[in-house]
Image: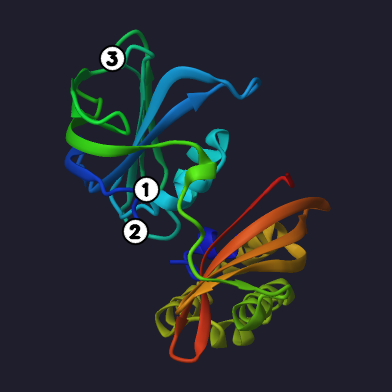
Amino acid sequence: MFAAGMALLCCAARAQGAGVEGHCEHESRTAAFVDGAAWAVVDDDTGQATGERMLVFSTYDLDSDALWRAKPHDREDAFREQDSGPGESARLQLTLDADGAIVTQQYLWLSPGNNLSRSGSQIGTYAGTPGARDRVAGRYTFSDEEDDPRCDLRFDIAVLGDPAKAPPLPGKPLPAGGGEPGRAYLANNDALIAGDLDALARLLPPDRAAQLAQARTQPEFAAQLAFMQGLTARDVRITGGRQDGDRAWLDFTATEGGEPRAGSAEMRREGERWFIVSESTRPPD
C-alpha cells in the first residue's frame, strides 16, 4: 500500500508481560530487542502441531493479545504486520526444536529490508531456564563467521496458546461502514486512487503531510505514485470493526489486481480527525 511503500500514511496490550533484554549486531547496526512472544509451530498442510516452538523478538512493543487471537498458522504473518512504518526496526525469529534444546532456524530482519537467515542442526547456543509451562525463558547467543550477525539475548516470554482462550478484542463494535474511522479511511483510499494529492495531504497528520509535500518535489514521485496506486485496495467495503477510545480497527473486503481480498486497518484519532496507522490485506478466508 502507498502508506507502507512511501512511509507517508503509516507510521498494546501484552499477554502476561514479557521480559526481553539483548541485541543483535550486523555490520554497523545494533538492534536492541525489548519485547517478544512464543507459540507452537503448526504444519501448514495438516494444521497439526509439530512439537517445535517459534520464538519472536522485536525492537518495538508487541500487541501480544492480537498475536494470541490470530490462527496458529497466521501468527508469523501477524507478527510481521505489527512492524508497520518507517524507522530502524528489527525482528528476530528463532525456531526451537521439539526437545526445547536447540535452535534450528534463525531469521533476522533489519529495516528497511535486510534479511538474514540460517538453518541447520544447531544455530547458535540456546540455554533454557526452567519455569512455568505457559512461558519460555533463557538465553540465546550467536556468533559465527565475521560477516554474520552477532546476537545475545536473555528473555522470559509468554507462550501463546489456543486462540479461543485469548483475551477479547478491545473496545466496542463498529457498524458496517466503520462510522467516523471508516469514513476517514475511505476518504484516504479514494484520494489515493484518484491521485488527488491535495485532498490526500488534508487527510494526513501534519508531519506526514510535510513528507508528502517534500516527496512531490522528487522526479521519481510520479512513478512511485503510479506503482502504489496499482497496489491499492479498490472496491473497499467496510464490514465493521471496533473502537477503543482514540484507536479503531476496521475490517473490510476489497479487490487488488482484480482479485478478492480481505483487509484490516488500524486508525488513530488526533483531536477531531482520524488517521491511518497501518493496513494490510490477505486472501479471503
Residue type marked 1: Ser
In the picture shown, does residue 57 fall above or below 250?
above
- The reply, left or right, for residue 25 in relation to residue 178 is left
Q: Name the residue under label 1.
A: 111
Q: Residue at x 42, y 19 (%)?
A: 52
Q: Classify mark 3: helix, strand or loop.
A: loop
Q: Mark 3 points at which residue?
A: 102
Say whether marks 1 and 2 touch (CB < 8 Å).
yes
Q: Residue at x 32, y 51 (%)?
A: 89
- The reply, left or right, for residue 182 in relation to residue 171 is right
- The reply, left or right, for residue 44 in relation to residue 83 is right
Q: Pointer 2: residues within 10 angstroms few (<14), some, or many (20+)? A: few
Q: Alpha-carbon distance for marks 1 and 2?
A: 7 Å
Q: Alpha-carbon distance for marks 2 and 3?
A: 32 Å
Query: Which quadrant, please, contains the C terminus?
Result: top right
Q: Residue at x 35, y 42 (%)?
A: 91
In the picture shown, does residue 56 fall above or below 66?
above
